[in-house]
Amino acid sequence: WGYNYFGQLGLGDTTNRPSPTQISGSWQSVTERGYHALALKSDGTFWVWGKNNYGQLGLGDMIDRTVPTQMGTESWQSIKAGMNHSFVLKSESQSASEFDGARLYVITSVGSLFNVFPFRVSLNQLRDRP
């Protein structure tokens, strides 16, 4: 509920809501920041909606979405929304607990360079940072 100017509530419109309103589906986790939301369903599919002015939804464009929209068909493990970027973690191993088997993808913008599709980041590079 609350402010919904960019459709970040995922209810199919941009009407503000004064009380909780359910979005149908079997959701495992949801994260929101910067007027966009990311969610994982219990089957591991990745869904996005809200403001998309920097391509932070990862759908290949910069069009806002007012309803949950599936991003890809892969199974994802974890999500995190930033102000104008998003992170998604995908397990590429048999066991999700095998850290080296996981792959981190980033959806972000840097200056005038927009990455509107997820791109892979090496976890070893992140571990070695101070």
Image: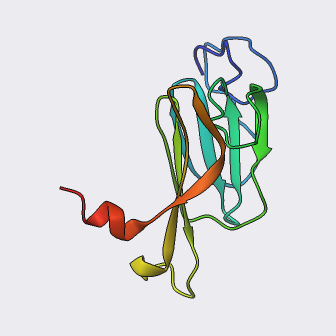
Between residue 113 and residue 38, name the one nearer to us.
113
Choose top left, top right, bottom left or bottom right for residue 109: top right
Between residue 97 and residue 128, name the one nearer to us.
128
Residue drawn 61% across the image and 13% down it: 18
Q: Is residue 19 above or below residue 43?
A: above
Residue drawn 71% across the image and 60% down it: 45
User: Where's residue 49, x and y in %?
Assistant: 70, 34
Question: Horizontally, is 75 left or right of 11 in the view?
Answer: left
Residue sitting farthest toward the front: 112
Question: Horizontally, is 109 left or right of 53 in the view?
Answer: left
Q: How many marks?
A: 0
Choose top left, top right, bottom left or bottom right for residue 42: bottom right
User: Where's residue 93, x and y in %?
Assistant: 55, 84
How is this picture coloured?
rainbow
Residue drawn 60% across the image and 30% down it: 36
Between residue 87 and residue 15, name the one nearer to us.
87
Choose top left, top right, bottom left or bottom right for residue 35: top right
Residue drawn 40% across the image and 67% down it: 123
Q: Quadrant of the N terminus?
A: top right
User: Where's residue 85, x and y in %?
Assistant: 52, 37
